[in-house]
Image: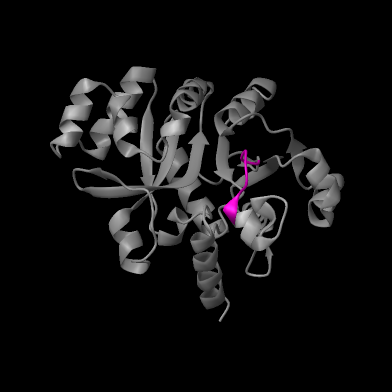
């Protein structure tokens, strides 16, 4: 399957975390996704990248609250025009995805990304979807080799899962290709709190996987194969050649880095 097939539905997670958000506080906005990066709200940049993609059809914005949407002219116009659909966020990303899949069972394949992916481009989206859909899997996960990120942005602090053959960074790009992928979402809800702790994530694959990881013997292929067997799914990675794909805006430092990168892009 390639980009000449039916358009992919894009679900953009834009819920608000509980408690104060340091990015929102620094930017002086009510919720992080409205923080300006490169002169416009980061959620705008994500929706624009998806809108420019050759592979994406519907764009679904899951969050922020309806009150926030009504108070924001940009989001209000997009949603009222029908260019973007809005759905209510749930208590956490995995529950939001699960609710969307339950209410829209015919939407597969579904691309899941986040509204704080301020550096996302149509090129990244098209590359990821082309590679993912051609693999004919149930779930594809976007990753960037840490060596690529470190070479381009050595001072950027990223969560790294270190496996045989190198470390890998997540890039908030997932494609749920078949209805069986709902099992991955259920698993996601179980381990959501551990996403910043690679060792705890590996532990969910079983004791042998944990031992192999601790000894430096666990490869990416082995980890995904074990996960697939555990969930009875075909799960595979897509390695992206874009270091910026691994940079979302979680901290004020990320916000400053994204501004710097975008300033260079615009020269």
Q: For the point 73% across and 51% down, which residue is it?
A: 30
Instruction: Let me know if residue 28 is in the magenta part.
Output: no
Q: Is residue 17 magenta?
A: yes
Relative height, residue 143 to residue 260 (above, below): above
Segment tinted magenta in the rendering: 16-22
| Residue 137 located left or right of residue 114 | left
Relative to 145, residue 27 above or below: below
Q: Position of residue 125 (x, y in %)?
A: 53, 51
116 versus 154 height, above or below = above
* Relative to 193, 121 lies left or right: right
> Going by the image, does 222 lie left or right of 113?
left
Work out which quarter of the rendered image holds the C terminus and state it: bottom right
Q: Position of residue 247 (x, y in %)?
A: 46, 56
Q: In this orientation, does residue 82 appear? A: no
Q: Is residue 236 above or below residue 206?
A: below
Residue 65 quadrant = top right
Give the main secondary structure, helix, strand or loop, of the magenta stretch: loop
The front one of 228 and 18 is: 18
* x then y, percent, for residue 200: 32, 31
Residue at the bottom extreme, as displayed:
267
Q: Is residue 135 visible?
A: yes
Task: Looking at the picture, tell me which residue is in the foreground, 235 or 33.
Answer: 33
Residue drawn at x 56%, y 69% is: 259
Residue at left offset 53%, top offset 74%? 265
């Amino acid at each position: 399957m390639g980009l000449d097939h039916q358009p992919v539905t894009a679900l953009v997670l834009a819920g608000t975390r509980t408690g104060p958000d340091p990015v929102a506080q620094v930017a002086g906005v009510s919720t992080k996704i409205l923080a300006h990066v490169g002169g416009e709200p980061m959620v705008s940049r994500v929706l624009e990248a998806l809108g420019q993609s050759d592979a994406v059809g519907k764009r679904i914005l899951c969050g922020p609250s309806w009150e926030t949407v009504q108070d924001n002219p940009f989001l209000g116009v997009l949603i009222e025009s029908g260019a973007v659909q809005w759905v209510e966020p749930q208590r956490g990303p995995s529950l939001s995805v699960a609710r969307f899949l339950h209410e829209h069972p015919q939407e597969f394949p579904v691309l899941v990304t986040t509204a704080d992916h301020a550096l996302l481009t149509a090129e990244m989206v098209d590359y990821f979807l082309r590679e993912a859909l051609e693999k004919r899997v149930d779930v594809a996960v976007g990753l960037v080799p840490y060596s690529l990120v470190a070479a381009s942005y050595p001072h950027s602090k990223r969560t790294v899962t270190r496996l045989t053959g190198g470390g890998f960074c997540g890039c908030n790009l997932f494609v749920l290709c078949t209805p069986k992928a709902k099992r991955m979402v259920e698993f996601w809800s179980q381990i959501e709190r551990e996403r910043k702790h690679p060792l705890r994530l590996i532990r969910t694959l079983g004791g042998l996987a944990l031992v192999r990881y601790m000894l430096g013997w666990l490869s990416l292929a082995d980890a995904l194969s074990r996960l697939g067997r555990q969930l009875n799914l075909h799960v595979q990675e897509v390695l992206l050649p874009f270091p910026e794909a691994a940079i979302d805006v979680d901290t004020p430092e990320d916000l400053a880095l994204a501004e710097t990168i975008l300033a260079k892009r615009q020269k």
